[in-house]
């Protein structure tokens, strides 16, 4: 059954997938609600903008390095892409990882969400480790330190689970 409507609320409640007419004879079958499609389209545009900025930035960097005449070794030589992301996150530099194209819409959405959650958990773990270190130096009680340590272990387990799922999706 086909439904045509301009009522977003109605479309979100009724439609399970959409046929999106993109112009030039291109029709896309999109699995998800209209709101999901709008979010997907917004993310696609943001990714395209980031990619174009990254390409322009890389071209500028390449030009500058050619102008210098010699290439200095990078402090991150030998570090994998994942480590570079973590290094950038630790330095406060926002990064994005290209999303594998073989993923379904829901998997792409989960992939993006996992990336943010992994970075957030990393920050929480770091803060809790600092809290434990300063708490032990301030003479916090054993029960408080034990509670923080238990919480730290739970966060590390959550981080490991999310990282494993992220890797699973990244390899598709």
Image: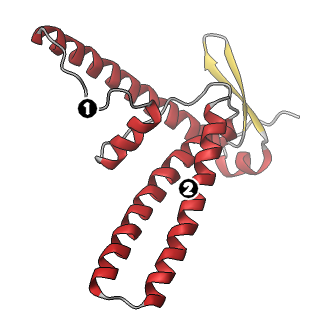
Label 1 to label 2: alpha-carbon separation: 26 Å
Q: Image height check: is 24 above or below 118?
A: above
Q: Residue furthest right?
A: 1
Q: Relative to residue 12, is residue 43 drawn left or right? A: left
The numbered disc on residue 58 is none
Q: Earlier in the sequence, mark 1 or mark 2?
A: 1
Residue at the image point whose x is 59% and y is 60% from the top? 158
Say which of 21 and 89 sits in front.
89
Q: Image height check: is 168 above or below 156?
A: above
The local secondary structure at tag 2 comes to helix
Residue 153 visible to the viewer: yes
Label 2 crowd (10 A; few <14 / some 14-19 / many >=20): many
Say which quadrant the N terminus sits in: top right
Q: Position of residue 81 (x, y in %)?
A: 44, 31
List the residue tagged with mark 1. Answer: 75
Q: Position of residue 79 (x, y in %)?
A: 39, 31
Q: Relative to residue 115, is residue 21 drawn left or right? A: right
Residue 27, quarter of the rendered image: top right
The numbered disc on residue 159 is 2
Picture colour scheme: secondary structure
Q: Relative to residue 154, is residue 104 drawn left or right? A: right
């Amino acid at each position: 059954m086909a439904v045509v409507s301009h009522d977003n609320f109605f479309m979100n409640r009724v439609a399970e997938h959409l046929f999106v007419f993109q112009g030039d004879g291109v029709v896309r079958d999109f699995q998800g609600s209209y709101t999901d499609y709008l979010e997907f389209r917004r993310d696609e545009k943001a990714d395209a903008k980031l990619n174009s900025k990254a390409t322009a930035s890389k071209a500028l960097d390449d030009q500058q390095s050619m102008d210098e005449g010699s290439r200095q070794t990078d402090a991150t030589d030998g570090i994998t892409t994942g480590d570079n992301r973590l290094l950038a996150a630790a330095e406060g530099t926002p990064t994005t990882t290209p999303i594998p194209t073989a993923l379904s819409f829901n998997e792409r959405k989960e992939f993006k969400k996992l990336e943010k959650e992994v970075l957030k958990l990393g920050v929480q773990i770091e803060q809790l480790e600092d809290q434990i270190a300063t708490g032990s130096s301030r003479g916090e009680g054993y029960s408080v330190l034990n509670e923080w340590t238990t919480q730290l272990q739970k966060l590390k387990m959550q981080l490991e689970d999310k990282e494993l799922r992220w890797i699973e999706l990244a390899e598709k």
